Image (cartoon, grey):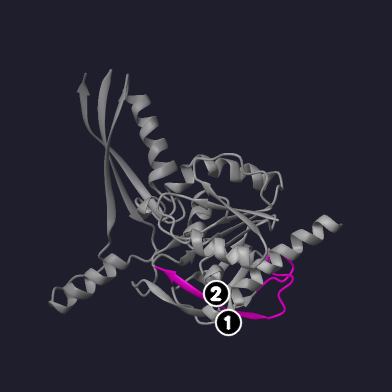
Amino acid sequence: MKKYIFEALITLKNGILDPQGIATQKVLKRLNYPVNNIKFGKLIEFEIVTDNIENAKKIAEDITFNTLINPVLENFELKILKEIEL
Amino acid sequence: MNAGIIVFPGTNCDRDAEFALKMCGFNTEYVWHDFTNISKYNLIFIPGGFSYGDYLRAGVLARFSPVMKEIEKYILNNKGYVIGVCNGFQILTEAGILRGALTKNKSLKFICKDVELKIMNKNTIFTKHIKKNNLIIPIAHGEGNYYIENYEELKNKNLIAFEYIENPNGSIGNIAGIYNEKFNVLGMMPHPERNSVNLLGNGDGREILLSIRRSIENEYIL
């Protein structure tokens, strides 16, 4: 068995209100930084224990698409950070 | 006339719901989220609160509780009616029972105040016995900004239940509540159970609950 460490980067789709981004941008503008389009996302790290990388990818995608994101509002990117022999 | 009030860890409007439903003549029972026998209820009330602390996203973790699978079957088999209020509405959209999604208020603030709603469809069991055209009902939410990609379809199918007269949270089309396609599920951000007697405002929230009760009673007579 192997352990795979995944990272899911979750971002809001275009047009979905990002209050954290707006609030942060307002403050940075007030501090006179030339900054625009601040967007917040979520980074969720998790481990999958299974026998091969294809399985691990499939499980990770299932988890991310079915639970971690809301497909109406969010996009995601999935990365494998590490593969560890158990 | 039996109403089941679903209680998740973090639900906090269950007692208001019980009070309001009792005032409107329902027998009520609390239903813990891992309970699976809900077929005896004529109405399922999913109250507001912060199920599972609203971690990950509002309502999403509650969607995986055992009772939600039963609610899906209950709706599919026309066993009765379901109303989800506030966090209950968020849970219903996350579960895919209602369309669209709820996201953070445009004002970036938690809003707690009375709002005026326009009833958009008076042919459903939830509204057909309401004489008024507009209702005053309180809202209390941080994530009540309703969004859907195909708004026109929702409108054309008459699935919009209520619209805000003055949009408090940025919802698309001023939407405050919607139905599913079978019109046996209503999800709404405003809290009818918090304005169920005159002492708490003008009692407009009672209108919705009484409409449900009268509709169910009439079904039995037929």
Image quarter (top left, top right, bottom left or bottom right) of the C terminus of chain B: bottom right
**Could you tell whether B210 is left or right of B33 in the image?**
right
Residue B174, placed above or below residue B32: below
The image position of residue B19, as x and y in percent, is 56, 65
**Which residue: 54% across, 80% down?**
B199
Helix, strand or loop at disc 1? loop
Q: Is residue B125 visible?
A: no
The residue that appears at 41% across and 43% down in the rendered structure is A67
Quarter where residue A36 is shown: bottom left
Q: Residue sitting at 41 percent across and 75 percent down?
A: B112
Q: Which residues are magenta?
A: B120-141
Q: In this picture, is A48 found above or below B204?
A: above
* Residue carrying label 1: B202
Q: Specify the amino acid type for callout 1.
A: Asn
Chain of the residue under label 2: B
Residue found 13% across the figure and 73% down from its top: A33
Are the two marked residues, 1 and 2, in contact with CB atoms closer than 8 angstroms? yes
Q: How many marks?
A: 2
Which amino acid lies under the numbered mark 2 shown in the image of this protein? Asn
Q: Please, what is the dominant secondary structure of the magenta stretch?
A: loop
Residue A10, position in %: x, y? 32, 50
Residue B191, x across and y down, in percent: 52, 69
Query: Which residue is more in the foreground, B76 or B171?
Result: B76
